């Protein structure tokens, strides 16, 4: 197996949900660079109300006082201490200095509870197909500087009346506090993507959590793998070839989050999507012309001579009809068996995974990005239990169309081309997106 084929880089779409946070203790990280698309995230510590230790001044004053005693008093203290020492040697417990008699033994203090890695994370409280405006001041009259979509994370920097001041991605501004959930570690954890960052070269990925397991491939330092489960001494990770296990001794764990999209980022995304839509429409038109030419050629060949009877007719394809998820599936399944071509978007001459999905939906007038990670932000999200025919299933580094019956159709590999696969969750699903 080619070791490069199994390497998986974590990339999170920059579309309407681009960005991430790496939790980093309690220090504020302004625009912390992380390898997840175009956005960054910041984490901030809760400020202490009082940074002065009240006992520090008292201790210092007592020390100064002791050092500045008159010589006579110091001498008297020395003789007193000597007398006490002698009395103690004679077994007279009552001779001990009375100053210490009332001293209380200090009770051991409990160590402060360890702060959760999700303690500083606030989560957007809106529906799957909605968003919150981020404004430059704490008022609905403020200028919109960005948008925070469903299941996105923020750092709450402070409050102003019913508004939170937040930082997320490349945005800093104000959101009404009712739209942000704080103090819920489980919720914050549920919207994060856990990754294992490899810190050594030639790390084996095995088919079992054991050094006796079969080696599926290798990854190098800096490679990032999506973690599906943390086990004793091992991390279960998602790769292009399915799930495997790597030793936890050679990885570092970090969490990535979907973050806000700034006004400038939104404008750039919309520009790219329009270009992709136009390109997809042009590709679909060319596909239709090619199909028409093939059909005409087939008709001429079959009518001209019986000598071509054994050559077989050229494949013909039905044009898209309707505007439902099932219509998308009916159209897409016609191209099963056609080739996989990296970077391609031709349903007949070859397409890669995202090019296939893009070209299918282009036939229905829907422009999608030619990027598997970019498709994680299209349409709106549905749960895996609610998948319907036509839904787009996004994996790490891959994308497919759900057919129904726990089956997908996708441009799989150069070896297999466009094909069906089952079960749909043959590898970890990141998100399911619905267009129709």
Image: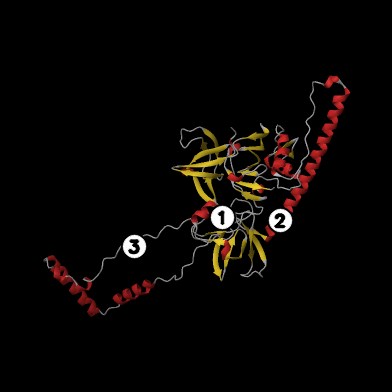
Q: Residue at x 73, y 52 (%)?
A: 272
Above or below, 232 against 419 in this view is below
Spatial separation of the CA atoms under disc 1 and disc 2: 22 Å
From the viewer's side, name the closer residue of 417 and 203.
417
**Taking 322 as reference, is 59 left or right?**
left
Q: Which residue is mark 2?
A: 268
Q: Which residue is mark 3?
A: 109
Spatial separation of the CA atoms under disc 3 and disc 2: 55 Å
Spatial separation of the CA atoms under disc 3 and disc 1: 34 Å
Label 3: few (<14), some (14–19) or many (≥20) C-alpha neighbours in 10 Å: few
The x, y position of residue 62, in whole percent, is 31, 75
Label 2: few (<14), some (14–19) or many (≥20) C-alpha neighbours in 10 Å: few
Q: Which residue is mark 1?
A: 21
Quarter occupied by residue 96: bottom left
Q: Residue at x 74, y 42 (%)?
A: 359
**Taking 147 as reference, is 189 left or right?**
left
Q: Could you tell me if the residues under marks 1 and 2 are in contact, i.e. CB atoms within 8 Å?
A: no
| Tag shown at residue 62 | none
At mark 1, the secondary structure is loop
Question: Which residue ends up furthest to the left in the rendered image?
Answer: 90
Quarter occupied by residue 271: bottom right
């Amino acid at each position: 197996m080619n070791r490069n084929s199994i390497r998986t880089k974590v990339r999170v779409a920059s579309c309407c949900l681009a960005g991430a946070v790496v939790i980093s203790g309690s220090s504020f990280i302004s625009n912390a660079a992380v390898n997840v698309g175009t956005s960054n995230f910041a984490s901030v510590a809760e400020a202490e109300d009082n940074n002065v230790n009240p006992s520090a001044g008292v201790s210092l004053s007592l020390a100064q006082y002791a050092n500045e005693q008159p010589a006579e008093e110091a001498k008297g203290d020395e003789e007193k201490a000597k007398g006490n020492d002698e009395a103690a040697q004679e077994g007279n417990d009552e001779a001990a200095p009375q100053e210490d008699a009332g001293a209380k033994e200090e009770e051991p203090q409990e160590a402060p509870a360890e702060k959760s890695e999700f303690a500083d994370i606030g989560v957007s409280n809106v529906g799957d197909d909605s968003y919150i405006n981020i404004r430059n001041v704490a008022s609905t009259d403020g200028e919109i500087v960005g948008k925070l979509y469903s299941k996105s994370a923020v750092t709450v920097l402070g409050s102003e009346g019913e508004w939170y001041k937040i930082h997320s991605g490349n945005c800093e501004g104000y959101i009404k506090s009712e739209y942000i959930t704080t103090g819920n570690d489980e919720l914050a954890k549920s919207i994060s993507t856990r990754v294992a960052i490899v810190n050594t070269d030639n790390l084996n990925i095995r088919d079992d959590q054991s050094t006796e397991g079969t080696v599926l491939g290798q990854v190098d330092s800096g490679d990032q793998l999506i973690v599906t489960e943390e086990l004793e001494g091992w991390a279960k990770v998602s790769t292009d070839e399915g799930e495997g296990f790597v030793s936890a001794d050679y990885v570092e764990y970090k969490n990535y989050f979907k973050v806000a999209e700034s006004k400038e980022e939104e404008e750039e995304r919309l520009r790219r999507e329009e270009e992709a839509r136009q390109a997809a429409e042009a590709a679909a038109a060319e596909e239709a012309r090619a199909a028409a030419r093939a059909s005409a050629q087939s008709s001429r060949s079959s009518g001209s001579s019986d000598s071509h009877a054994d050559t077989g007719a050229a494949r013909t394809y039905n044009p898209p009809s309707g505007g439902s998820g099932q219509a998308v599936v009916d159209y897409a399944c016609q191209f099963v068996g056609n080739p996989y071509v990296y970077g391609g978007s031709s349903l007949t001459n070859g397409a890669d995974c995202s090019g296939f999905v893009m070209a299918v939906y282009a036939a229905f007038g829907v422009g999608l990005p030619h990027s598997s990670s970019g498709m994680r932000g299209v349409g709106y999200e549905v749960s895996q239990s609610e998948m319907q025919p036509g839904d787009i299933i996004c994996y790490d580094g891959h994308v497919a169309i759900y057919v129904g019956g726990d089956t997908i159709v996708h441009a799989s590999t150069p070896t297999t081309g466009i094909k069906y696969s089952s079960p749909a969750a043959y590898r970890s699903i990141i998100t399911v997106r619905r267009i129709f």
